[in-house]
Amino acid sequence: QVSVINTVDTSHEDMIHDAQMDYYGTRLATCSSDRSVKIFDVRNGGQILIADLRGHEGPVWQVAWAHPMYGNILASCSYDRKVIIWKEENGTWEKTYEYTGHDSSVNSVCWAPHDYGLILACGSSDGAISLLSYTGDGQWEVKKISNAHTIGCNAVSWAPAVVPGSLIEQPSGQKPNYIKRFASGGCDNLVKIWKEEEAQWKEEQKLEAHSDWVRDVAWAPSIGLPTSTIASCSQDGRVFIWTCDDASGNSWSPKLLHKFNDVVWHVSWSITANILAVSGGDNKVTLWKESVDGLWACISDVNKGQGGVSAVTEGQQNEQ
Amino acid sequence: TPLTDTVPPQVVPGADPSARQLCFAWGPAEVLVCETLFGRAGGSRSRCLSRSPSPSRFWGEGRAGAAAPVLTGSVAGTGEGAPSSSCVFVVRRDQDIYIQTLRKLFNESHGIFMGLQRSEEELAGKSRKAQLVQVSKNYRSVIRACMEDMHQAAVSTRDPALQGQYSTQVSILSAMELIWNLCEILFVEAATAGPLLLRLLDWVRLHVCDVDSMVREVLSSESPSKHKLFWNVVDVFVLQGRMDEARHLLSKEASANPTSMNMYKILDDLMKKMPVPSLGNIQTLTELELKWQHWHEECQRYLQDGTFASNPHMESICKILLGDEDAILEKKELMTTWYHFLVTRLLYSHPTVKPMELRFYAQSSMDLFLGGESSPEPLDMILMAAFEFEMHQVIKECSIVLSNWWFVAHLTDLLDHCKLLQSHNLYFGSNMREFLLLEYASGLFSHHSLWQLGVDYFDHCPQYGRVYLELHIERIPLSTEQKALKVLRICEQRQMHEQVRSICKIMAMKALRNNRLGSALSWSIRAKDAAFATLISDRFLKDYCERGCFSDLDLIDNLGPSMLLSDRLTFLGKYREFHRLYGEKRFPEAARLLLTLMTAHIAPCSFWMTLLTDALPLLEQKEVIFSAEQTYELMRCLEDLTAGNPDKQKFQDDDVETTKVEMLRLALARNLARVIVKEGTVEGS
């Protein structure tokens, strides 16, 4: 039973490409082909337009909210090859940084876990991935991974911050040694995992299973287990769940969630990583959950269409 | 856990599935959905977008084309027709937590839940069981109280839509209580043969209420025996095993119709003598069975003798007493449900039924009652699963049918405490109880005040409770300082240091944005965030330089050991202390502190000029304050400052600066002169 609790009329003049809630679910950011980024206050079922941000010269593909400890910060990326970072200062939203280092459309932006600082990963159709790090005083440092994916990079997603080794409380003020990782998906049909080593980004893993362009990747939030999980979806209609059991991140094995009849564009994890939302073919969104013996079950369809139900049987629950 | 929804498809209003796709994103507690058209972003095969409305057709063309993609400048501007909707829908799975009248349910059941978790298992055997049964009864009474409230709300509202909602809620709650009650009898109390029947009779009497108004009507009429529904009511009593009430009504009929006195006396006698199980162990089951057999034969004899032939009503009652299925089924309308039929059957044909035998009678009762006319509803299936002692099935079916996790979470928890659930390892290694509690508690977190209940539930999920709490508690909007403090306290109590730090940082940032420096500083101290503390201290100092005074003096004065968090903060604290000492005219101490600030490098170099300027009044005092050694130190500091300044040119050009430096040099020299004389002439003081 899914119920609509709020309908926000964005008044975008063209197709909406992304809508994202902020950390607390109090604000909504949307972006559109009409080149604008809009921010709404959606508390208590309301919808108040807070900002209408102009600055892009082409359709805006994605928006991403940074962690609130850095203030109210939103990143947007667009066909116009730009990445713009917007910030709220004294109650008004303004452009705080603009990155124009890509040669074609920037398709995806994703903020790193707040533990790493304020870092934004951007994937572009020019095949490169850029990492913008805030160094203080309005300055941003850029690192670029050229030719990350041939033809283009469609999606980037960060791994959750996990302190390697001991779980002992670090003395205050001392930064633990995080191993930063993120995943990317591209037009070379690959999912790649990147790791930062000695201030350089290196390709750590190449995950091959798709037979067509990878359109989205999503790294699942951590619930304290040593396993890591990534979901990837592709033009080939398949959604794979990749898991890596050991902490060193060496052996990833894919499991096919489902083969859809059409392109799968988007996958996304709920905050406790127990539900995966997939934009299936047939214009619907399906929700999936892992069941007892590791098979994935479709638990709900928003706009249910034909087909697309998992193989898990109802008897699963009672086996004992 | 397979949770395939049997609910009909949901359609987001306004979204046209044939022409558009759904773009979605997770919020902390909801899903955003809006219409879009994927494929525009990213590596488009062809930058020229076709006019076709269907995306799959679009891609088909691109691929079939095979030719090199055409990269043109024009792209997605206005796409294939205007989007039919510029709306973003915020969608949630269960909204029940927002129903005001259910609030009591959530709050009070939370109390019962906590009591149950804390109850030690020192008690064993019967006492423990009695304790658990009491807990179960408590839950049920909360459900009933809620039902009452909901019913009141339904009755008192004028809005038909609301009324409909409330009424629906009432029937849902009623069904929940029905199921829970049965589970209590079968699982928690685990009633054995004998008492089992009595409990089931109570259960039926409590829950089949459709006939209540008819009963009231007849009883309150002037001469009930003349009421057209009189015999219906007698039948109801008999079917529910309410012998005394049945006999009482029959006596009225007998006095009104003396001709049937004989028949009445016999029937009355039979009803009086009917052997029933008792709660105390007065007789064994075998004894009961014997007596019952004897009684059954007696009824049989009277029936066959045609004793009741002239009165069809009484005859039918006798047949019911004999457990004649057809006779009982004739009264279908009065029983209204198959489980009522089941219990009546058992009462009159197998009063000593054993728990494990229930399943057979249940299945046949349902079949006979529904008779192929209607098919079982979800509620029926749940009850059936209970009669079959398939606990997992009960829980699963309830999960599917009910719109929120409240029921299954609490019931499963109780059953788990009864040690009835085998550890059923799910994917993430936790058991079903924990799984359901996690789901329920997660749902609570999207509510602005119920989230606090959720914290307790997570606490009692040993495997994943903590990490779920960590993930959820960070998402609570910290709209007020009080709320932030509340959340903090919860995190601190559980040593959730990461979350504490994160929340403090967020609050510090918020305060800073609103120019509340004092608040920002105290939050960053709490967060043990040295970098932020430094930043804020700098702001304070900058403010001081601009305005000549400090804001938030109280805070700075009472920093205490937290001053050591960052060097800049330490300096701020000490600098303020200097001002205080000066204000209290404790000049020698102030002087010493001032000097230490520079020599111990607590003060940042950028501030030295200000400090030295602060020293001026001390140097100009009538009394000599700085000793010779101190004066030399000061001079050295000044020289370090001016010599080490890379922008010497600028420095020298700046009139104000050079004047200051000169004044300082002069003052220092003068002081030196005075102090040398003073120290030279001091007589041992």
Image (cartoon, coloured by chain):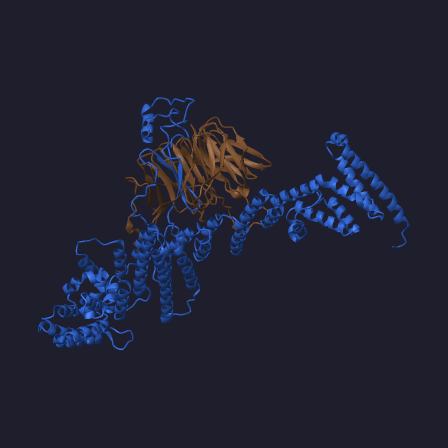
| Residue B14 place in picture, x, y as percent | 35, 38
| Residue B355 falls in image quadrant | bottom left
| Residue B354 falls in image quadrant | bottom left
Q: Is residue B39 visible?
A: yes
Image label count: 0
Q: Is residue A178 visible?
A: no
Image chain in blue: B
| Residue A1 place in picture, x, y as percent | 34, 47
- Residue visible at 79% across and 43% down? B616
| Residue B290 place in picture, x, y as percent | 19, 75
Using the image, determine if residue B155 lies above or below residue B126: above
- Given residues A22 and B633, the one toward you in this image is A22
Left or right position of B323 against A93: left
Using the image, determine if residue B323 lies above or below residue A179: below
**Quarter of the image containing the C terminus of chain B?**
bottom right
| Residue A14 falls in image quadrant | top left
- Given residues B295 and B566, the one toward you in this image is B295
- Given residues A207 and B282, the one toward you in this image is B282
| Residue A168 place in picture, x, y as percent | 54, 51
Image chain in brown: A
- Given residues A249 and B323, the one toward you in this image is B323
Left or right position of B421 against B499: left
